[in-house]
Image (spheres, helix red, strand yellow):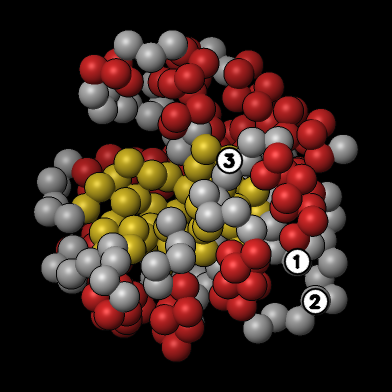
Amino acid sequence: MLKENINSIYEMIDSLSDEELFEPHMRKWADEATKTAVWEVYKFIHVNTIAVSKTKPVEMLSEIYDLGERNFGENKVQELTEKEEVLPKDIHWHMIGHLQRNKVKYIAGKVALIHSVDSLRLAKTISEEAVKHNCEIPILIEVNVAGEESKFGVSVEETLPLIEEIAKLPAIHVEGLMTIAPYVEDPEENRPVFRKLKELSVDIAAKNINNVNMSVLSMGMTNDYQVAVEEGATMVRVGTGIFGERDYSIKED
């Protein structure tokens, strides 16, 4: 089942036309090697699936790993660190859930990317822990594009001022933006949300702020990732679509 789920996502990405995949991204070629890369390779370089593995057992992650997946996303610090200790070291761990400042120290040096930075206080703590651990920590700014009261994230209007302040901090690097779109039955309803985040990233990139890169757009989940990719997502966070339904009886840390 897991292999079929993974393959269905890859097939969706492969089915997109050049215009659907390239136009919304408006990317610059990174280097000559990328510029001459074959089309299939280029797609997998720039549209990455994050296997959202929260509440899933290590055995299931190992099976996905054996199928070639290397990007795993966790919502809870304790679960991420426990899995990181026992799974292969070439896995890229993504912290995608709300992050408390007092738990940053446990993941410093262990995560490839923190997707959920939504305050200067949190960014300062990440910066401080990165310096202590002698590492660099890439982050995304979580933007509450839809303005949902139940969701974390800064408003669209607050995003640029926050990034300008974070850019001054050492050992922390803004790599792009993340949003969690509303849960909807029809994925098309979220297209304006994804488009708005893409437009925001383009506007911020045009500012040419030191220590800020808008190369990553983390948006789209199981029910709407195809629309997100069409609107410029470079990372899609897929859990149920890969692993199946979760057991939410597992207690949070």
Q: Residues within 10 Å of mark 3 (few under 14, many from 20)?
A: many
- Residue in the picture at 38% in, 58% down: 140
Compute the Cα span from label 2 to label 1.
Answer: 7 Å
Q: Is residue 222 left or right of residue 209?
A: right
- Would residue 252 appear left or right of 130 to someone viewing this image? right
Indicate which disc, 3 or 2, sits on the residue closer to the N terminus: 3
Q: Which residue is mark 3?
A: 49
Q: Which residue is mark 2?
A: 250
* Relative to 52, residue 242 above or below: above
Q: Disc 2 residue type?
A: Ile
Q: Which of the image's four quarters has the C terminus? A: bottom right
Q: Position of residue 199 (x, y in %)?
A: 34, 41
Q: Are marks 3 and 2 in contact (CB under 8 Å)?
A: no
Answer with the quarter of the image where residue 154 lies: bottom left
Of the residues shown, which amino acid type is indicated by label 3? Answer: Thr
Q: Quadrant of the N terminus?
A: top right
In the displayed structure, 108 sits above or below 47; it is: below
Q: Pick whichever of labels 3 and 1 is earlier in the sequence.
A: 3
| Secondary element at image label 3 | strand
The 10 Å Cα crowd at callout 2, few under 14, some 14 to 19, many 20 or more, is: few
